Image (cartoon, rainbow, N blue to C red):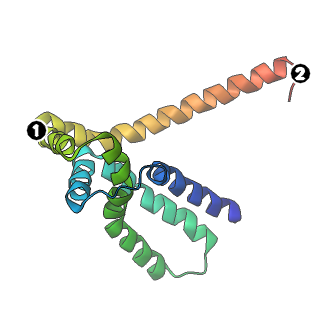
Amino acid sequence: MRKGLVLVVMCVAMLFAAASSVSAQAPNDEYKATLEKMLELSGSMASAKAMVPQMIAMLKQQSPSASTAFWDGFQKKWETKFGSKLAELYAPVYQKYLTLDDLKKIVAFYETPVGKKLGASTPAMMTEGMQIGQQLGMEIATELQKDLDAQGNK
């Protein structure tokens, strides 16, 4: 049971890892709001929000006695606050590399027809890309095992 909880914690930690290692300068509310809009328009927010039900499913295994109503409420709460929390944690990272003006220009791009198309396609492309990454990882692991076996290592 602990293994699943550790996996969930690691997933969340990896998602927010970059936010913990950036400068302490706090982005202002306008920067955070613009970043949140950019993440939404780019499709990045939808991809990240898709992780919430997956994390909840793993957490359910750790506390199977909790009611369905509890889990439904918990998931709804996090689906609601996930976007602003993500933007809050990502803001220092983005601010390290992009100015508010940069973000506004990126938002303007995502409001164009091709930007909207890219933003709408991003979650599906990310899903397909993750599947490709898993296949590649399996291929690497298989080849590694063959190479180890060939050298007498197991």
Q: Give the side of residue 9 with respect to residue 90, left or right.
A: right
Q: What residue is rendered at 51% in x and 57% in y?
A: 12
In percent of width and height, residue 128 lies at 41, 37
- Circle on res. 152: 2
Q: What residue is rendered at 21% in x and 48% in y?
A: 41
Q: Secondary structure at mark 2?
A: loop
Residue matched to label 1: 112
Quadrant where the N terminus sits is: bottom right
Decide: few, some or many residues near mark 1? Use Cα within 10 Å; few <14, some 14-19, many ≥20. few
Q: Give the side of residue 7 with respect to residue 118, left or right.
A: right
Q: Nearer the viewer, residue 13 or 64?
A: 13
Mark-to-mark CA distance, 2 and 1? 58 Å
Residue 73 vertical position relative to residue 114 in the rendered view, above or below? below
Circles 2 and 1: CB atoms closer than 8 Å: no
In percent of width and height, residue 16 lies at 46, 53
Kindly identify the amino acid type of the residue bearing the numbered disc 1: Thr
In percent of width and height, residue 24 lies at 41, 56
Q: Nearer the viewer, residue 131 or 34?
A: 34
In percent of width and height, residue 119 lies at 23, 42
Q: What residue is rendered at 36% in x and 63% in y?
A: 85
Nearer to us: label 2 or label 1: 1
Quadrant where the C terminus sits is: top right
Kindly identify the amino acid type of the residue bearing the numbered disc 2: Gly
Q: Residue furthest top?
A: 150
Decide: few, some or many residues near mark 2? Use Cα within 10 Å; few <14, some 14-19, many ≥20. few
Residue 63 vertical position relative to residue 114 in the rendered view, above or below? below
Q: Nearer the viewer, residue 42 or 30?
A: 30
Residue 12 vertical position relative to residue 146 in the rendered view, above or below? below
Q: Give the side of residue 30 with respect to residue 58, left or right.
A: left
Q: What residue is rendered at 60% in x and 81% in y?
A: 65
